[in-house]
Amino acid sequence: HQQTMSVESFNGVAPHHRPPAADGGFTNWAVLVDGSSVSGKAFDASMYFSRSMNGRGREDRVSVIHAFSKETDANKPYYLQGPRIMQQYETNLIRGRRMYDSGGPKRLQSQVLPVDFSQLPLGEQNLAHLTFARTPSTTESAPPLVASMILSMREKVHPDYLFMGSFGITGKPVGHLGSVTDYMIRLAPCTVFIIKNWRPIPTLEATCNYLVALDGGAASFRGLEQILQIAKEGDSVVGVMISPGPEDADDKVISEKAVAIMKGGPHVLATTRVVHRTLVEGKGTLGEQLCLASDEMEADFLVVGTSKISPGAENRSSLTHLGSVAFYASQHCKCHAVVVKPAIFHAKA
């Protein structure tokens, strides 16, 4: 069974031999699975978005990634062992491909990628190394499981979007992220969807509501652009600027985002608007008020951007890829969260 899950297999064709899409590219959707129910919901979310994009110009790839080792598998029940999990998602992908192919002119490409983190090259086992503009380098010590997935994504998947559960098989209280999720939203070189176990995944037949936090930074602008690209017809995208103002700087940000929406033209299918909310003293921090706004607007996804990078960080506590607002909101919002990295992060990571 292990031989049928070769990391070089891509529906029977090596990834680098695949013909390009008509417009010269793919949209790569990656999902991390571990056998938990919430990672199953993350897979469903990846299929929801890839299916909604069928026929909108680019080819779609879905990559299912599971990190394991024979040593840790020996202490797990059978249904949580690597071969069983990958077998399950090979079956899920068959169903997913059929649903995708029946919904539009394109054909879904997919792969299952088992990653044995005990086989990492010497020197890579405890280090995930990322290079950024404006700093020589930023590094963080990461567990082999996390480092192996980051390296596999960088070398074999090149994801545009990554889906994962807010916690894994051990479970976490509401308002807390699992340790792997905590690492990945900081270190993954792409936009990360954090799927909450207690929130349903939208269906193609229903509308989806997105709340995008705006602050004038490059990451929040990119977040709005990305959501406008993937939102389907009938969805609602609301960009919200929360500040004590509104001041001239706030008005400038709002007007810039409104212009960006108009420039999207026919490619923007969702209903869009940009609003300002006043940061009321005594009503909580900015992160708390973002979570409150997502509740009031019944958002399915809260989109937050981050661009704060601390040069020379050596451990997880000092590495601030996430600003405090983005970190709080992604943890505590009741809806699913989307953490968007600035474009330079994607280019350099």
Image (cartoon, grey):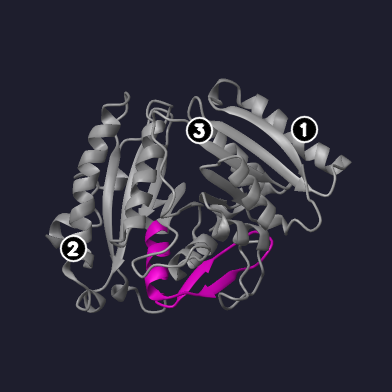
- Viewer-side label of 2, 3: 3
- The tag on residue 231 is 3
- All told, the count of numbered labels is 3
Query: For the magenta stretch, what is the residue range?
Result: 124-153
**Would residue 128 be counted in the magenta stretch?**
yes
**Would residue 173 be counted in the magenta stretch?**
no
Looking at the picture, which amino acid does disc 2 mark? Pro
Looking at the picture, which amino acid does disc 1 mark? Ser
- The tag on residue 83 is 2
CA gap, disc 1 and disc 3: 21 Å
User: Split into 4 quadrants, where in the image is the N terminus?
Assistant: bottom left
Name the element at disc 1. helix
Whole-percent x, y for residue 178 in the image: 45, 67
Residue under the image location 46 percent in, 48 percent down: 161
Of residues 155 and 145, the one drawn nearer to the viewer in this rendering: 145
Asked whether the viewer can see residue 308, the reply is no
CA gap, disc 1 and disc 2: 52 Å
Whole-percent x, y for residue 273 in the image: 67, 30
Q: Which residue is mark 1?
A: 255
Residue under the image location 21 percent in, 67 percent down: 81
Hey, which residue is sitting farthest right in the picture?
248
In the picture, measured across the screen, residue 111 lies left or right of residue 313, that is: left
Ranked by sequence position, the earlier of labels 2 and 3 is 2
> How many residues crowd mark 2 within 10 Å: few (<14), some (14–19), many (20+)?
some
Residue under the image location 44 percent in, 68 percent down: 172
Q: Are marks 1 and 2 in contact (CB under 8 Å)?
A: no
> How many residues crowd mark 3 within 10 Å: few (<14), some (14–19), many (20+)?
many
Looking at the picture, which amino acid does disc 3 mark? Ala
Ranked by sequence position, the earlier of labels 1 and 2 is 2
Whole-percent x, y for residue 162 in the image: 44, 51
